[in-house]
Amino acid sequence: MECSKRIYLIGSRGCGKTSVGVGLAKRLGCSFIDTDAFLCEMQGKSVSEIVDSEGWDAFRDCESAALIAATGDNAQVIATGGGMVLREQNRTFMREHGVVIFIDVPPTELARRLNADPLDAQRPSLTGKSLVDEIKEILAARMHLYDESSHITVDGTQSVQEIIDNIMELLETNPVS
């Protein structure tokens, strides 16, 4: 199977969107872009620096602009920030411009992964609570948005290679255009 469509990966921070996206793009023979990295490059600041200096609303504005700017004319794999689904315009844009895949990972596994690789500059606290409590709260608030946004949901507790294999199989059998 070759890359014939634009694929958006959504899910909570730490679910593996970037790792899966890089591998999936390689397997499909297309380009990969991470909207958080793209946004930081466009702004010349880290996510934390943007949030600290301009606030979350300004960051979400930048995030929406990065989504549109990152979406090229060609088929590609795009990993989005965990909060990309918070704005209806982003959810609609992704669904209208490609296949949206939700990588679903339970809170305890997300906390384990984030503790192992914190990347504090890229992953600022949203609530100031403990990591596990924050993840549970954020997932509870966003789960319906991930579900509403996605064409396909995959189990993100598997290895990166297993997730990619699962996505490939679902892309071949799913009628999403």
Image (cartoon, rainbow, N blue to C red):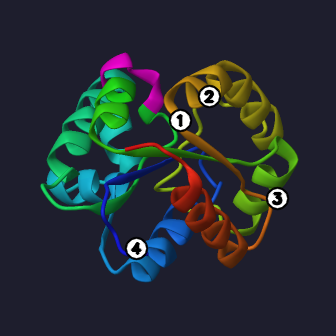
Find numbered disc 3 in the image and state the secondary structure of the residue it sits on. Answer: helix
Find numbered disc 2 in the image and state the secondary structure of the residue it sits on. Answer: helix
Task: Tell me which corner region of the image, top left, top right, bottom left or bottom right, holds residue 106.
Answer: top right
Examine the rendered structure and indicate whether residue 53 appears above or below residue 137.
below
Separation (CA) of disc 1 from disc 3: 25 Å
Dot 4 or dot 2: first in sequence order is: 4
Q: Which residues are magenta?
A: 85-89
Horizontal side of residue 105 vs 52, given as left or right: right
Separation (CA) of disc 2 from disc 1: 6 Å
Give neighbour class at mark 3: few <14, some 14-19, many 20+ (Cα, 10 Å): some
Q: Name the residue carrying label 1.
A: 150
Q: Name the residue carrying label 3.
A: 112
Give neighbour class at mark 1: few <14, some 14-19, many 20+ (Cα, 10 Å): many
Q: Could you tell me if residue 17 is visible in this image?
A: yes
Seen at 67% across and 64% down, the residue is 166
Q: Quadrant of the C terminus?
A: top left
Q: Which kind of residue does numbered mark 1 sit on?
A: Ser
Seen at 81% across and 32% down, the residue is 133
Task: Tell me which corner region of the image, top left, top right, bottom left or bottom right, holds residue 50.
Answer: top left
Seen at 31% across and 54% down, the residue is 6
Q: Name the residue carrying label 2.
A: 147
Query: Was residue 175 drawn as part of the magenta stretch in this picture?
Result: no
Seen at 66% across and 31% down, the residue is 128
Q: Which kind of residue does numbered mark 2 sit on?
A: Asp
Question: Are dots 1 and 4 in contact, CB under 8 Å?
Answer: no
Find numbered disc 1 in the image and state the secondary structure of the residue it sits on. Answer: loop
Residue closer to the observer: 62 or 177: 177
Question: Are dots 2 and 1 in contact, CB under 8 Å?
Answer: yes
Q: Which kind of residue does numbered mark 4 sit on?
A: Ala
Find numbered disc 4 in the image and state the secondary structure of the residue it sits on. Answer: helix
